[in-house]
């Protein structure tokens, strides 16, 4: 069966371009598509970041803006890979991209699998890239404080998507709902971002050693892919 594939596009250069690209992806994909489920959640968070950058919420808005753009472009690269052969799919994203039209997987499973790939794999790479571009370091200035400020936005978004699957106050659940709740219950966005920061520090320390960087990044991608497969089990 043919499935919708967003057209590849040049990398975004600003947060506004990031938002525009996410909206274009949303317009092309069916609401039930696994990538669309993640994209909606990601768009909501990015709109929040954009708003707070303009409000002076972050200590270093230049760092946050650059990180946001570099980070998003890694996701867009994964989406663009859908236009190529299956072998071109990024390892960390392959489980979600390959299963995005699989019946029986709930939207929240797709959303969290996307967050797993993007946070646990892409975010450490984005931190290193943004720091290199801006001639700074992960632990310099208020970079880590600003990184943690984003957690509050992600908390609200994650809670929203969880409640859309299992609204508060629901006492009686069927076997399927209980099984899905069990799968997603072990994944935490804050824990993922804490691990991602530690991974970014490790990648930063070995950035001048290509072999070490490649080994660490390769192992990271494979580990993240395994976690995503666990989140995308049909129950």
Image (tube, rainbow, N blue to C red):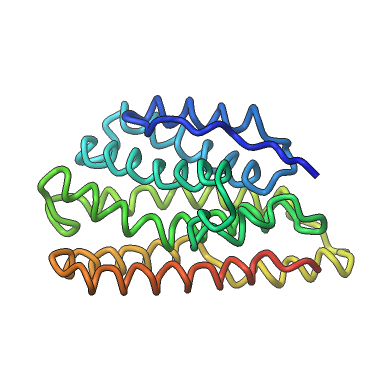
> Which x, y percent locates residue 153?
45, 45
The residue nearer to you, when weighing 45 against 127, is 127
> Which x, y percent locates residue 164?
72, 48
Can residue 189 be seen here?
yes
Q: Residue at x 57, y 45 (%)?
A: 82
The residue nearer to you, when weighing 13 against 210, is 210
> Which x, y percent locates residue 78?
49, 48
On screen, residue 56 versus residue 108, left or right, reads left
On-image quarter of the N terminus = top right
Q: Residue at x 44, y 67 (%)?
A: 221
Q: Residue at x 19, y 64 (%)?
A: 204
On-image quarter of the C terminus = bottom right
Q: Residue at x 36, y 33 (%)?
A: 52
> Which x, y percent locates residue 56?
26, 31
Q: Up-down: is 1 above or below 16? A: below
Task: Count the numbered circles shown.
Answer: 0
Can residue 166 be seen here?
no
Q: Up-down: is 60 above or below 127? A: above
Residue lying farthest to the left in this orientation: 135
On screen, residue 186 versus residue 132, left or right, reads right
Query: Residue 144's quadrant in the figure?
Result: bottom left
């Amino acid at each position: 069966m043919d499935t919708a594939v967003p057209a590849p596009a040049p990398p975004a250069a600003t947060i506004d371009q990031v938002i525009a690209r996410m909206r274009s992806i949303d317009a092309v994909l069916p609401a039930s598509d696994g990538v669309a489920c993640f994209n909606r959640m990601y768009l909501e968070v990015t709109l929040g970041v954009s708003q707070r950058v303009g409000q002076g919420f972050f200590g270093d808005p230049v760092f946050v803006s650059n990180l946001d753009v570099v980070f998003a472009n890694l996701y867009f690269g994964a989406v663009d890979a859908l236009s190529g052969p299956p072998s071109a799919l990024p390892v960390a994203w392959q489980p979600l991209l390959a299963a995005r039209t699989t019946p029986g997987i709930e939207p929240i499973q797709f959303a969290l699998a996307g967050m797993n790939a993007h946070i646990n794999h892409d975010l450490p790479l984005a931190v290193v890239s943004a720091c290199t571009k801006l001639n700074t370091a992960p632990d310099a200035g208020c970079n880590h404080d600003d990184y943690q400020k984003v957690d509050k936005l992600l908390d609200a978004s994650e809670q929203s998507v969880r409640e859309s699957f299992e609204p508060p106050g629901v006492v009686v659940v069927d076997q399927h709902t209980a099984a899905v709740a069990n799968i997603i219950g072990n994944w935490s966005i804050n824990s993922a971002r804490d691990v991602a920061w530690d991974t970014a520090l490790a990648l930063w320390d070995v950035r001048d050693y290509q072999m070490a960087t490649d080994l660490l990044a390769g192992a990271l991608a494979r580990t993240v892919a395994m976690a995503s497969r666990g989140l995308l089990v049909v129950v």
